[in-house]
Amino acid sequence: MTGPTGPLVNCPLCGLDYAPGGDTCKEHGCPLSFGTCATRHCPRCGYTIPDEERSVAVRLARKLLGRREPLIAESLAQLPAGARAVVSRLQGDPELLSRLTAQGIAPGVTVHLVQRSPTYVIEIGETTIAVERRVAEAIRLRPDGPR
Amino acid sequence: MYGASPTPTPDPADGDVRAEGGLRGRVILLGNPNVGKSVLFNALTGLRATVSNYPGTTVEVARGRLAGTDTEVIDSPGLNSILPLSEDERVTWDLVRATRGDPGAVVVQVADAKNLRRALLLTLQLGQLEVPSVLVLNMSDEAEARGIRIDQEGLEEALGIPVCTTVATKGLGVAEVQAALAAARLPRNHLPLSEDIAGPALELLTDGESAGSAEPGFQARYHEALLAHAETLARRFATEAEPATKAMSRRLGRLAVHPIWGWPILAAVLIGLYEFVGVFGAGTLVDLFETKVFGGYLSPWATALFGLVPWAPVRDLFVGEYGLITMGLSYGLAIVLPIVATFFTVFAILEDSGYLPRLAVMSDRVFRVMGLNGKAVLPMVLGLGCDTMATLTTRILPTPKERLLATLLLALGIPCSAQLGVILAMLAVVPIQAAAIWFAAVAGVMVTVGWLAARVLPGERGDFVVELPPMRLPELGNVLSKTVARVEWYLKEALPLFLLGTFVLFALDRLRLLDTVVRAGKPLVTGILGLPAEASSAFLIGFLRRDFAATRLFDMSRAGALDVVQLVVAMVTITLFIPCIANVFIIAKERGWRTAAAMAAFIFPIAFAVGGLVRVVMLGLGFGGAS
């Protein structure tokens, strides 16, 4: 994890492009360092910038704000809030499927995911339905999105 | 234009036309949830079924007579498919199956004109079942406002049944529905279903016993096939809706379940409930009725009147310490009535506004800890009105395990509005920390017992799927009449027991047995709970009704007989006490006597144990020295 494998970093002070190293602050003899501080140091001028990738707080904030790698949502449970998608099939307990189809959720239908918390809320045309995560997982989506 | 378009010329080959001879027999209203069945029922019969804006209100079917005729009109619980998935949907299924071969019966399907596709799924099933029917497109004003135009005649032609449009809340088109009843006919059954679906589906629709024998997943495939055809019909006969972007109700509906804004809205609802029921109802109104009306007029008048009776036992029976008027009626009418009336008013408003299913969304997480899901909030909130009513409503929960858990939690820890009002009034005089202890103790016991019971009891939790109806402004008339009907129901249940309880106390007192009871209860009441021995009489009548017992304790505390610790201990114990006798009977009726007895045997020791524990904790925290 600590090897200089990542992309080069540009020092905002002196302009040097450098590969961020490991516990450089320790090498610099920082008395506060326990090897965990999330910073990068320019090897030339010593200027310190925060290393977002190593910051627990930044990672947590990103998770909370839902900024993640874009992925192809396979089920409604993976769809970001506000998105639309087309149902490809329903998968799960037969009783649940019978209930969902009776409410108008079926393959080919466009669903609009309004929100994911406290429960998932979906709109299908004029119908609004709240479901829990394990139900959202039963609703599988077409990979190509709404058409 | 609201009303039936000219009915297609009767074609004898098309099905049986029942114009001649008029219509006798029965009319069954059915349809998806929240399409206005109950409103149409009221308009047709001039009666009032409980109309509300959340799925599962019509648990029992409402029956009435078509205005000016002998025809029976039956309202049924909302459903999405004729094939039943829960106990309440089974009711409708049974009603529909019973119409097959009944020449006097007509099914009136009520549909949301904005959601034709979903409604047609039911229409097509009715067609398969070959029951004479009429399709009513209700809320056509909302549909029109959204730019939806429906080709009524085309639809009539395609389905082979009369199609009417109504705005039931305004009474528009209702007369046309009545006229169309006589023209109801067998729908055209020409579903393009493949043989491997149509055959088994009809078998499922008609025969309850075969329901379990179909291959798993068949029902879903059948629904999909129906939906596909419904979609085709909807596309052909209805224009698409314009998206309702800026509608107030839609925005409010979304805010109410919003991950952030949902919480302040929930808090506002709870504060409003507390202010109206706890402060206005249990404070202002109770004070008015108790001190002014009963204390100032009725009780003195009655005392004066019965003062003329020379025989002391009769005098005491009515106006003595345990008098039917001075205690029974005064508790029932002066204290309980204002509280339940205010609670049921708020409840009716919440119901009609469409907020209750949204409350289910907000509380889903909490209920999941207790082996339930958000749906269980509906019986729980209704339980704050009356646990007995609420126990009946547990039918809307999908699995037996959930129904049992919800029944247990209702019986254990949900105080009914009368009890809650009295408790709030009592807690108003103690420090806020003491009130918090009451809440923490009751909530803690509920969650712990729910959590444990969910792990001990066999079975599964059902999936959380709740439809969110649009938020609507409640209609004042509807709110009032529902409140009045519920209060009447409540008084019919509560007042006789209040009088019976008072009479039991009176009789025991006369027979000098009350002291015996007090002495017998002393180890429990004084030993464990540290209450004055007279509190035994409260717990004794608590076996009849918890709210009666709470009222008795309320009376004692106002007489200065209880200090802070005693007050909180008494409140915790009586909140967790076994439910009122009517509730026990309902539990027995719904779940069997063994369950009812087991619950009572489980709850009784818990109430006293927790009460004793709270006492120890409060004394340890130094509350004892405060008084």
Image: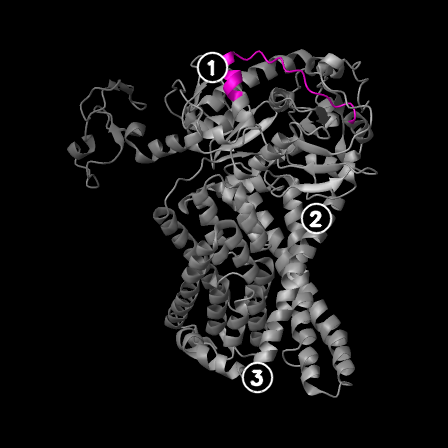
Which of the 4 quarters of the picture holds residue A137?
top left
**Mark 2 lies on residue:** B482
**Mark 3 lies on residue:** B511
Name the residue type under label 2.
Lys
Residue drawn at (58%, 50%) of the image: B382
**Mark 1 lies on residue:** A145
The chain holding disc 3 is B
Picture coordinates of residue A87, whole percent (x, y): 48, 18
Q: CA distance from mark 1 to mark 3?
A: 80 Å
The magenta segment: B182-201
Picture coordinates of residue B356, whole percent (x, y): 58, 42
Name the residue type under label 1.
Gly
SS at mark 1 in the image: loop
The chain holding disc 1 is A
- Answer whether residue A111 is visible to the viewer in this image: no
Residue drawn at (63%, 56%) of the image: B275
Q: Which badge, 3 or 2, comes first in the chain's sequence?
A: 2
Image height of B142 relative to B439, above or below: above
Depth check: give the residue in front, B304 or B353: B304
Q: Are marks 1 and 2 on the same chain?
A: no
Residue drawn at (48%, 23%) of the image: B220
